Amino acid sequence: MGVPFLHISQQGFVDLLVNRIEQQEKTFVVTANPEVVMQANENPTVKGYLNQATYICADGIGVVKAAQILGDSLPERVTGYDTMVKLLEVGQQKRFKIYLLGAQKETIEKTITNIHKNYPNVEVVGYHDGFFDWNNNHIADDIAVLQPDLVFVALGVPRQEKWITENLDKFSKGVFIGVGGSFDVIAGTVKRAPVIWQKLNLEWLYRLLRQPSRFIRMLVLPRFALKVFSLKLRGQGTAK
């Protein structure tokens, strides 16, 4: 698929990141779905962002199934949302400090309110919505001073990966992870698929039915499928 996915379970990945936090090892995480895979294959700039990542995880059943077809099976999907929530759960025990970047002002404020409610021991040391002058802001400088354990970036792909890549050298520690629309779910402005839909690997369909505007984005899936079967015919694996 052209992307070197980490072979790890959801819980194993959370444990790995917690260890990185405790060892104060700077970490850049990309959770990549088929859309990200295709962007990386078609856009050298996006590919460059992914090349800077410490870990790339399979965020989507499409990626997991594709890896299976290509003979390089992944244990399960490792989503940005689930990773964020599980890290908040651990943070409740270990009193992690976090910084949030992205989304609408109202959304990020609701996200923080719900984090304070559900994870009172997690300290939100700072935040900024997703609307700022890209070339003239002090966000990275503020984060460097605050030194949070976790920085959740919800700017959408590939802006969140671009932001992390361009600013990572300014930080000495912390896990930086792009989480897409996770703030919307935590804030309650977007409802996540019921568990039964998740277990049936139909969360993508649920989101499409709830948000028809996502249809244009879904058009990448046939191209992704064609790429996977083309790689299969040529005998190439996941990271080729």
Image (cartoon, helix red, strand yellow):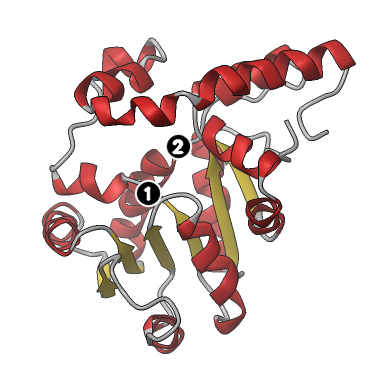
| Residue 42 figure quarter | top right
Q: Is residue 168 above or below residue 60?
A: below
Q: Secondary structure at mark 2?
A: loop
Q: Is residue 187 above or below residue 230?
A: below
The 10 Å Cα crowd at callout 2, few under 14, some 14 to 19, many 20 or more, is many
Residue shown at 62%/35% (left/top)?
A: 38
Q: Secondary structure at mark 1?
A: helix
Residue shown at 37%/49% (left/top)?
A: 84
Left or right relative to 20: residue 146: left
Front-most of 170 and 158?
158
Q: Position of residue 188 (x, y in %)?
A: 13, 42
* Spatial CA span between label 2 and label 1: 9 Å
Front-most of 43 and 114?
43
Which amino acid, by three-letter code, is at mark 2?
Answer: Thr
Front-most of 194 and 213?
213
Q: Residue furthest right?
A: 235
**Can you identify the residue that label 2 sits on?**
79
Q: Position of residue 184 (x, y in %)?
A: 22, 46
How many numbered tags mark residues here? Answer: 2
| Residue 51 figure quarter | bottom right
Say the numbered circle drawn on residue 84: 1
**Along the polypeptide, which appears first: circle 2 or circle 1?**
2
| Quarter of the picture holding the C terminus | top right
The 10 Å Cα crowd at callout 1, few under 14, some 14 to 19, many 20 or more, is many
| Quarter of the picture holding the N terminus | top right
Q: Position of residue 43 (x, y in %)?
A: 66, 48
Left or right relative to 239: residue 26: left
Q: Position of residue 74 (x, y in %)?
A: 65, 25
Front-most of 149 and 127?
127
